[in-house]
């Protein structure tokens, strides 16, 4: 018996419904194959766990709802057939509209529109004046690159114009201008102490 055949017969073996000949072949395979032995032990453990789980009774209102919505088997009256007939939209479009309006499709379309609008805003593309040439990947990349350089330049300009930065730069310049020989002498002393 192969491992694939054992997997097919394993559920019947655990339930005890195998014929004697198949059970003997399965048990002889289990004695020689550690992987299948582990699989059989896992299946028996799961079956034992399911047997220990308490039985859950459905709430009464669930049964009432099922019975209310399930067809009763009796013939519907003319008034019931008219009230339950599909609307003109369903008759016109069939199931197409219903399948398109599934939550996963609607959410996917909304996320796609949101993503494109965010990219267009970042690349400074006005969707009202959008042309097919504007969707060229090179043009979009150039717009993004241009925007990032502008943001960097504005940030550096803001940083350079801060009063604190200007004050620190002017003090450092004053100190270096006052004693240019001290800075070179300190450098010479450091080089002499290293030798």
Image (cartoon, rainbow, N blue to C red):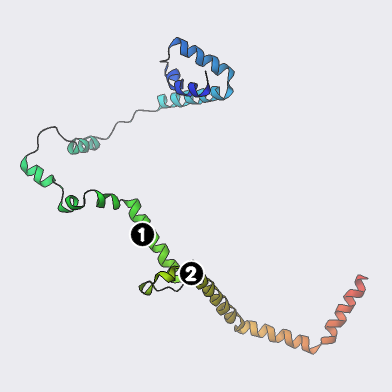
Query: Which residue was labeled with disc 1?
Result: 110
Residue 18 vs 188, above or below: the answer is: above
Q: Nearer the viewer, mark 1 or mark 2?
A: 2
The residue depicted at 91 percent of the width and 72 percent of the height is: 193
- Whichever of labels 1 and 2 marks the residue nearer the N terminus, that label is 1
Distance from Cα at disc 1 to Cα at disc 2: 22 Å
Which percent across, then down, holds residue 163? Answer: 61, 84
Residue 99 vs 153, above or below: the answer is: above
Residue 77 vs 96, above or below: the answer is: above
The residue depicted at 33 percent of the width and 55 percent of the height is: 106
State the residue lying farthest toward the front: 133
Which percent across, then down, holds residue 157? Answer: 58, 81
Which percent across, then down, holds residue 94? Answer: 21, 49
Query: Which residue was labeled with disc 2?
Result: 140
Q: In which quarter of the image is residue 154?
A: bottom right
The residue depicted at 46 percent of the width and 68 percent of the height is: 136
State the residue lying farthest toward the top: 20
Image position of 169 (left or right of 52): right
Residues tagged 1 and 2 counted as in contact (Cβ below 8 A): no
Quarter of the image that includes the C terminus: bottom right
Can residue 73 be spotted in the picture? yes
The residue depicted at 6 percent of the width and 42 percent of the height is: 78
How dense is the environment of label 1, judged by Cα within 10 Å: few (below 14), some, or many (20 and up)?
few
Q: Quadrant of residue 168?
A: bottom right
Total numbered labels placed on residues in the image? 2
State the residue lying farthest toward the left: 78
Can residue 101 be spotted in the picture? no
């Amino acid at each position: 018996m192969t491992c694939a055949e054992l997997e097919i017969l394993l559920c019947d073996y655990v339930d005890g419904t195998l014929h004697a000949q198949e059970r003997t072949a399965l048990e002889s395979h289990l004695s020689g194959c550690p992987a299948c032995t582990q699989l059989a032990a896992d299946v028996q453990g799961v079956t034992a766990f399911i047997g220990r789980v308490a039985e859950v009774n459905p709430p009464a209102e669930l049964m009432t709802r099922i019975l209310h919505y399930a067809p009763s088997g009796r013939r519907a009256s003319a008034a019931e057939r008219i009230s339950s007939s599909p609307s003109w939209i369903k008759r016109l479009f069939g199931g197409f509209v219903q399948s398109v309006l599934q939550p996963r499709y609607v959410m996917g379309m909304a996320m796609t529109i949101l993503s494109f609008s965010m990219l267009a805003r970042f690349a400074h593309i006005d969707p009202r004046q959008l042309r097919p040439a504007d969707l060229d990947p090179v043009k979009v990349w150039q717009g993004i690159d241009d925007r990032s350089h502008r943001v960097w330049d504005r940030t550096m300009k803001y940083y350079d114009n801060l009063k604190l930065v200007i004050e620190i730069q002017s003090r450092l310049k004053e100190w270096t201008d006052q004693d240019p020989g001290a800075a070179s002498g300190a450098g010479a002393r450091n080089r002499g102490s290293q030798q």
